[in-house]
Amino acid sequence: MKVPGKNELLSEKVKYLDLEKIRTIRDLLIAFQHTSIQSRNLGKALSIYERMLSDQARPTIFMGLAGPMVPGGMRKVIRDMIEHGLIDVLVSTGANLYQDFYVGRGFSHYIGSPNMDDLLLRKYFIDRIYDTLVDEEKFRETDDAIGRIGDRLEKKEYSSREFLEILGKNISDKNSILYTAAKKHVPVFCPALNDSSIGIGLTKHYSKGKDRIIINPIRDNYELAQIKMQSKSAGVIYIGGGTPKNYIQQMEVISEILGADENGYRYAIQITTDTPQWGGLSGCTFEEAQSWGKIHKEADKIQVTIESTVGMPLLVGAVLQGRSFRKRKPLNMRWNNDKLEGLKKGK
């Protein structure tokens, strides 16, 4: 291997950011590609995302969503990603999906402070999510609404994908994540549905007796693995880490166990504040994931260490101001219960 010389190492100069020339979010992220530290990584994420969107192989894009993104004000950003075909599959924590449904019923989040008197908040039945407030009484009403939806359904086994599509059809808010996913036939999975207020609502349904629905999390594994197996190419976007990230990562392992050839994710973007030295998956690098075969050995990849409510809207805004997604065809998924009978490019 040739050792580079000094002139080669010093061949590319940093381009100092000139804000007087910046007019759009896209201008900013393109300029970031020639700066340093996390701004350069965010600029690289734009390049990778646009290559993924314009790839002629039409990779299936899986997004893992963790952290308080809906209470943090990012609800419509996520909804727009679905509406404009920037992702094909969403895997989320239950909290984000529950709070999307909560807002879809006409309720709100409120501006607070991390330094508020939490015992006073408890007195008024107000919940705090860092500097955001919600009305616990409206949460309880939403829990009851979810339980009643369970009461009305045919008493059988469901995947989280099926049930979340039903939730999306039970609201009419066009800015909703679940409503838009149901309308666009984009599958939404929640591997820890019970670890959320959706699970609380369904627990009330379950408590009423034997005539009840069942959410089967292993069926989720099987359904999501089929999407991965039928995708000739695939990419991932992780907002935060946690269970959604691991869930998407392990689909490569499950696919191989079910007989598919090794086919790790070809594109990989992560926006997170976690770091790898603690050993947890949220901060795990894509290089570490390559040791498991989850990420392809030649993957186009970047990890951006930045708070998600800052990094995600900048990245998505820059993509939406470009043209890379405009000719991308949607995926049509035809389900027969737990069987994916077709995964085809639509018009």
Image: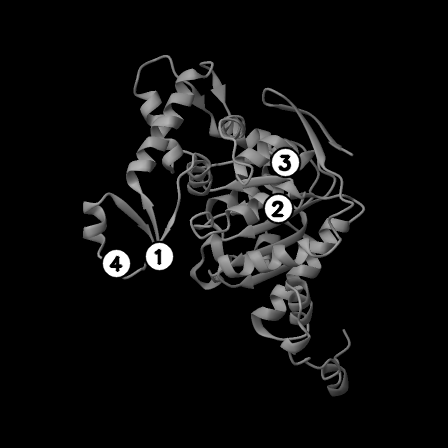
Please tell me whether residue 131 is drawn above or below residue 340 in the rendered image: below
Q: Earlier in the sequence, mark 2 or mark 4?
A: 2
Q: Left of 132 or right of it: where is 125?
A: left
Left or right: 345 with respect to 221?
right
Q: Position of residue 192 (x, y in %)?
A: 43, 37
Residue at position x 33%, y 56% in the image = 112
The mark that comes first in sequence, 1 or 3, is 1
Q: Label 2 vs label 4: CA separation? A: 34 Å
Mark drawn on residue 117: none
Picture coordinates of residue 151, whole percent (x, y): 39, 17
Give the labeled residue for mark 1: 131
How many numbered discs sit on the rendered protein? 4
Q: Residues within 10 Å of mark 2 (few under 14, many from 20)?
A: many
Indicate the amino acid at tag 4: Met
Tag 1 and tag 4, C-beta contact below 8 Å:
no
| Residue beneath the point at 43% across and 50% down | 68
Q: Secondary structure at mark 4?
A: loop
Q: Nearer the viewer, residue 70 or 13?
A: 70
Q: Is residue 56 above or below residue 222?
A: below
Amino acid marked by disc 1: Asp
Mark 1 or 3, closer to the camera: 1
Q: Which residue lies under the disc numbered 2?
A: 81
Residue tagged 4:
116
